[in-house]
Amino acid sequence: MSTLFGTIRNPDRTAFMGRVGLVPVSTGPVGHGPETVAWAPVVAQTNDAGFFTKELAAGDYWLHIGNATRRQIRLADDAKYYLLQDLLGDGPWGPVPQNYLETPGGIQFINGTTGVFFPVALVGDEDEIGWRIYASGQVLPPDSYKVVTGTAFFRVDTDGPWHAPFLSGDADNPAMSFGPADAQISGGNFRIAGGRWQLRNVTTGQFHTFFVIGLPGEESWAIGPGITP
């Protein structure tokens, strides 16, 4: 099953607290009569922060948010997580950060399974660097994350060398890599667009939203589908 998640805001940026309905697309838009609805809708309830998450089979859906919004979305892969805003483009939720929080202790990323934010840094020697996901609520040193002329750097073990993450390779399944210590990535390695912190695939030029997934104690990093700027 694929997993759809997101944080929904009202126009005044307060959290939307209500139901999110998803109806598989049949031959046309979903209406109110039984002849236009192929399947019973799947319903997710947002929490007090406006966050929801729902497992769904891959396919095309009509998305209903409250009584106001209806849009068609596609979950292309049955084994991936999808941030709702990646499927809708840059609106209508404006500039409110969706997948990240910048804090005095660096940057944190949302968990698409639980809606909780987690601080991240790097771990390992230079030839075996990987992501380290700290406990939710843990405060990292202020200098665990920085941006230098379009390149985002994370620190190994919060006090070690700085390395820049980037993606490369196939658009549907890019590889995560890390540059040499203090080396900038030509053309930059990330952007913030539509409230989303995204890593750049240096091969395709697309950007992928970065986030955390997994139940407590089983967290790992993940990325969304490629988005062409």
Image (cartoon, rainbow, N blue to C red):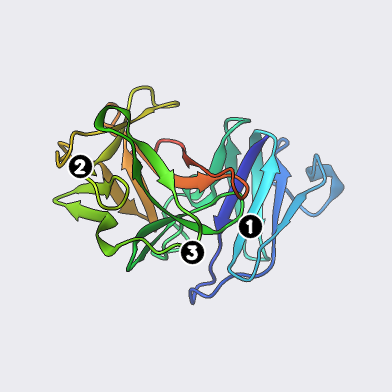
The residues bearing labels 2 and 3 have C-alpha atoms spaced at a distance of 29 Å
Q: Is residue 123 above or below residue 177?
A: below
Residue at x-position 49% and y-position 77%: 12
Residue at x-position 18% and y-position 34%: 180
User: Considering the image in quadrants, where does the C terminus appear?
Assistant: top left
Q: Earlier in the sequence, mark 1 or mark 2?
A: 1
In percent of width and height, residue 44 lies at 71, 56
* Label disc, if present, on residue 188 of the rendered structure: 2
Question: Contact, CB < 8 Å: mark 2 with mark 3?
Answer: no
At label 1, counting other C-alpha atoms closer than 10 Å, the crowd grade (few under 14, some 14-19, many 20 or more) is many
In this picture, residue 64 sits left or right of residue 152: right
The residues bearing labels 1 and 2 have C-alpha atoms spaced at a distance of 32 Å
23 vs 217, nearest the viewer: 217
Please say whether residue 28 is visible from this viewpoint.
no
Which element carries disc 1, helix, strand or loop? strand
In this picture, residue 137 sits left or right of residue 18: left
Task: Give the amino acid at mark 3.
Answer: Gly
In percent of width and height, residue 127 lies at 27, 27
Q: Which residue is mark 1?
A: 52
Question: Contact, CB < 8 Å: mark 1 with mark 2?
Answer: no
> In this view, which residue lies farthest toward the right?
34
Question: Contact, CB < 8 Å: mark 1 with mark 3?
Answer: no
User: Considering the image in quadrants, where does the N terminus appear?
Assistant: top right
In this picture, residue 67 sits left or right of residue 207: right
Which element carries disc 3, helix, strand or loop? loop
At label 2, counting other C-alpha atoms closer than 10 Å, the crowd grade (few under 14, some 14-19, many 20 or more) is some
Classify residue 142 by image quadrant: bottom left
Residue at x-position 53% and y-position 68%: 9
Which element carries disc 2, helix, strand or loop? loop
Q: Which residue is mark 3?
A: 137
Q: Nearer the viewer, mark 2 or mark 3?
A: 3
